[in-house]
């Protein structure tokens, strides 16, 4: 599965790269077993084992993609400060392990829907850096033609349903997608991601109730980064054990900074959902940036806490240590990899900067789907002010 | 019935650029003008007629044998059965809720992607019996009884629509859909745009609204005024069994999200509708009674108050032209414009509140577009800006009554 992901790169990452690092990215699928750092905590189900099957290729893959995601988010930070990205920009650095681990456990037929912290998930689903930066800067080549922005990334052909600005509203949508998967008898599941802040939304419980009632293959994933914008989880939730909040729905608490734990949990959840219905996963993760670019992120938490997490739990560092300990690459090689990634991101930014803004006529396209003669610009259809006999 | 619809690119005829100057002698969408039937005639498509790919025509009534042009298809001025159905000899009589059910059932037969979700739509048969019998026929997975969570099940319907299903979401009363406003506004209306066209949301959101018989303030709401600003949705209001079935079918087949407004008091209207399959154009208004002196624009239940007033007006010597606008978003300014150019006076009779209602938007649209043709200011009769009281007499005064319509017409026609 990691192999196919590598060979069918639609994000254009592998090619300039593999030449120099052929000995890593080639077909080394010797299996490696990795122990997750922490055991899983389960609610109403049996936790999966801590030993995760992987391969050296997958390990390097994880490192590379996570480093790319990290670099992309940092670059987005600078672009925002340079006022090339406007509005809201919610960055995912620190949480990359969730995106990567989830991708590794599922196929492109399984759907993912998330909230507004969606850049890295989009990348994981096969989006390209060019599409990401173009969309962030509002250019034509963006994945939503520049009309969506940071919070509205979608990729229909990889079953990535976005990209939603209103907190919690994506969870009923996700359960609807799961319903459609069941209706169409596809053997696929839907991962509906939300945060610890959104976990207190009523519509979540409504959707969970329906999913459990109708046995939908929906997996609700709480990316618990412990802060709902500026409010710590203990100030917002009476019961911060989000994996237990499903009550009658089983749950699993996972160390979200460990990509392999995430992978194992998602695989477990997929099997569970296809057979028995919904399950909740709580990913214990952390974001280094503030809630968005307008939030410094230090008024409600200490810098020591942030740097503490960065030192002890950083997901990329963990993978790096694993790579080095399994002798898959040297320090220097990894550094060179990171340099390559940096260059790739810079190239993508430069290319996106050159991309034109959308045409003025794009303002009116895609409001309605063409068909039945509708092309409306408001309650009065100016083009009907036309010929009278 | 292949003539009627389902052309994938059929409506995408002209590449319209909104910045071209609109030459009033030139129709922008050429394929539509070729069929330019607007409310005066029906073009009847033969069953294998492949040329009628444009959907700009009015209700297509497919006949198998001889094509038939029916001038002034709107028949009589009977207040209760102002039928826009053709003078078809074959036909069956039914009530409006049965017509809705027939339309829904036909569409579910035709397309396995259509499903219904709502409270008590399945085993109970629907609180207004619109979905009666469907659960037995199609099963629990296609006619879904949801728990009472409008926000969630509307969201689920929209999520399912993103993948290609065509859910029909029922709000037991339109007022309950206020709980789902976020889903309707942000996800239903906007996803097609914010995803750059990747996702279409072919949902139909329907339910009864309007002032009933002493149902109380919260169950007598007119949601069309709240929803009208949402970009990306279409709104239609049905008023007769004929257009109820036609609009239901068209709404289900449309790729855009459509909100179908029914009215609590109109479910038991009886009319004879054709046996053959037909649909109504979603963006078209219906000419109820052609006339010369004044244009009265109305929709849903107020149509019947207007027709009742029309009887009185005819006796007094006036000749009102009554148009049921049917399409609340977008307005059918073509039909309306033609009428204004003929009569030069407009009265809008609606059930929405005075402030920010459909009438308010329509007044603005008419003033903007047809100002030169008006001999008098556009007058708009709407409900009072009050919560609907329970007491029967008070409730009567909140909505527009026929006597008020007569007075208004007399005033405008002085």
Image: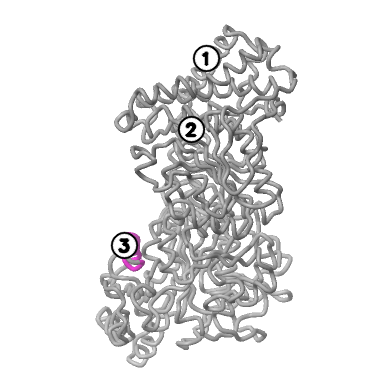
Magenta stretch contains residue A34? no
Q: Main secondary structure of the magenta part?
A: helix
Q: Label 1, on which residue?
A: A343
Q: Is there one chain holding both mark 1 and mark 2?
A: yes
Magenta segment: B358-370
Across and down, in percent, residue B413 comes to 28, 80
- Observer-nearest residue: B375 or A150? A150
Across and down, in percent, residue B122 comes to 60, 71
Across and down, in percent, residue B352 comes to 34, 71
SS assignment at label 1 = helix
Across and down, in percent, residue B29 comes to 53, 54
Q: Is there one chain holding both mark 2 and mark 3?
A: no
Q: Label 3, on which residue?
A: B364
SS assignment at label 2 = loop
Q: Label 2, on which residue?
A: A285
- A383 relative to B3, above or below: above
Q: Residue at x 56, y 75 (%)?
A: B126
Q: CA distance from mark 3 to mark 1?
A: 56 Å
Q: Residue at x 50, y 64 (%)?
A: B283
- Residue B30 visible? The answer is no
Magenta stretch contains residue B364? yes
SS assignment at label 3 = helix
In this rendering, position of residue A124 left or right of residue B339: right
Q: Residues within 10 Å of mark 2 (few under 14, many from 20)?
A: many
- B374 relative to A382, above or below: below
- A235 relative to B334, above or below: above
| Image quarter hosting the N terminus of chain A | top right
């Amino acid at each position: 599965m990691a192999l196919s992901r590598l060979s069918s790169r639609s994000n254009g990452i592998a090619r300039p790269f593999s030449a120099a690092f052929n000995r890593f990215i080639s077909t080394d699928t010797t299996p490696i077993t990795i122990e997750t750092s922490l055991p899983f905590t389960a609610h109403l189900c049996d936790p999966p084992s801590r030993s995760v099957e992987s391969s050296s290729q997958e390990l390097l893959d994880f490192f590379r993609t996570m480093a790319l995601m990290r670099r992309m988010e940092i670059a987005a930070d600078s672009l925002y400060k340079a006022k090339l990205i406007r509005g809201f920009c919610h960055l995912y650095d620190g949480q990359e392990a969730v995106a990567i681990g989830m991708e590794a456990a599922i196929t492109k037929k399984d759907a993912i829907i998330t909230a507004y912290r969606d850049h890295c998930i989009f990348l994981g689903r096969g989006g390209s850096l060019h599409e990401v930066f173009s969309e962030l800067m509002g250019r034509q080549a963006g994945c939503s033609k520049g009309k969506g922005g940071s919070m509205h990334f979608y990729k229909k052909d990889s079953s990535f349903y976005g990209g939603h600005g209103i907190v919690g509203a994506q969870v009923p949508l996700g359960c609807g997608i799961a319903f459609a998967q069941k209706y169409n008898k596809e053997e696929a599941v839907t991962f509906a991601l939300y945060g610890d802040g959104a976990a207190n939304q009523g519509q979540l419980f409504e959707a969970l109730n329906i999913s459990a009632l109708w046995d939908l293959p929906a997996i609700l994933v709480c990316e618990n980064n412990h802060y709902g914008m500026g409010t710590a989880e203990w100030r917002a939730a009476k019961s911060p054990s989000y994996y237990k909040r499903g009550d009658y729905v089983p749950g699993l608490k996972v160390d979200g900074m460990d990509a392999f734990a995430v992978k194992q949990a998602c695989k477990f959840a997929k099997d569970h959902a296809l057979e028995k219905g919904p399950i909740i996963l709580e990913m214990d993760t952390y974001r280094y940036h503030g809630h968005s670019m307008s939030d410094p992120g230090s008024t409600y938490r200490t810098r020591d806490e942030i740097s503490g997490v960065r030192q002890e739990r950083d997901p990329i560092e963990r993978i790096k240590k694993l790579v080095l300990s399994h002798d898959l690459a040297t320090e220097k090689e990894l550094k060179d990899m990171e340099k390559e990634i940096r260059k790739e991101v810079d190239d993508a930014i430069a290319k996106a900067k050159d991309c034109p803004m959308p045409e003025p006529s794009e303002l009116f396209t895609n409001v309605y789907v063409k068909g039945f003669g509708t092309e409306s610009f408001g309650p009065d259809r100016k083009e009907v002010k036309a010929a009278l006999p | 019935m292949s003539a009627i619809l389902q052309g994938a690119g059929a409506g995408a005829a002209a590449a319209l650029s909104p910045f071209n100057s609109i030459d009033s002698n030139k129709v922008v969408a050429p394929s539509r003008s070729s069929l330019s039937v607007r409310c005066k005639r029906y073009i009847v498509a033969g069953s294998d007629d492949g040329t009628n790919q444009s959907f700009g025509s009015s209700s297509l009534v497919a006949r198998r044998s001889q094509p038939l042009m029916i001038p002034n298809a709107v028949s009589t001025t009977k207040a209760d059965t102002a039928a826009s159905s053709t003078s078809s000899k074959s036909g069956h009589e039914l009530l409006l809720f049965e017509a809705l059910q027939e339309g829904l059932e036909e569409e579910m037969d035709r397309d396995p992607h259509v499903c219904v979700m709502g409270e008590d739509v399945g085993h109970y048969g629907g609180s207004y019996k619109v979905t009666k019998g469907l659960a037995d026929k199609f099963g629990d997975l296609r006619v879904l009884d949801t728990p009472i969570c409008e926000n969630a099940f509307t969201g689920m319907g929209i999520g399912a629509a993103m993948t290609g299903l065509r859910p029909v979401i029922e709000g037991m009363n339109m007022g309950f859909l206020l709980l789902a406003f976020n889903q309707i506004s942000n996800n239903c209306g906007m996803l097609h745009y914010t995803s750059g066209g990747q996702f279409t949301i072919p949902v139909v959101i329907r339910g009864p609204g309007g002032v009933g018989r002493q149902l109380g303030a919260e169950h007598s709401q007119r949601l069309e005024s709240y929803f009208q600003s949402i970009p990306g949705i279409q709104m239609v209001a049905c008023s007769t069994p004929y257009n109820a079935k036609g609009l239901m079918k068209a709404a289900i087949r449309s790729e855009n999200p459509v909100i179908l407004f029914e009215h609590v008091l109109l479910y038991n209207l009886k009319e004879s509708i054709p046996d053959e399959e037909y649909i109504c154009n979603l963006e078209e208004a219906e000419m109820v009674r052609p006339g010369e002196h004044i244009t009265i624009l109305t929709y849903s239940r107020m149509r019947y108050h207007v027709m009742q007033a029309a009887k009185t007006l005819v006796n007094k010597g006036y000749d009102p032209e009554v148009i049921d606008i049917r399409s609340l978003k977008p307005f059918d300014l073509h039909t309306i414009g033609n009428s204004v150019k003929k009569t030069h006076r407009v009265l809008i009779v609606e059930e929405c509140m005075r402030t920010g209602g459909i009438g308010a938007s329509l007044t603005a649209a008419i003033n903007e577009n047809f100002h030169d043709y008006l001999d008098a200011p556009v007058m708009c009769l709407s409900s009072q800006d009050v919560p609907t009281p329970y007491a029967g007499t008070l409730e009567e005064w909140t909505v527009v009554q026929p006597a008020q319509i007569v007075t208004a017409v007399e005033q405008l026609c002085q």
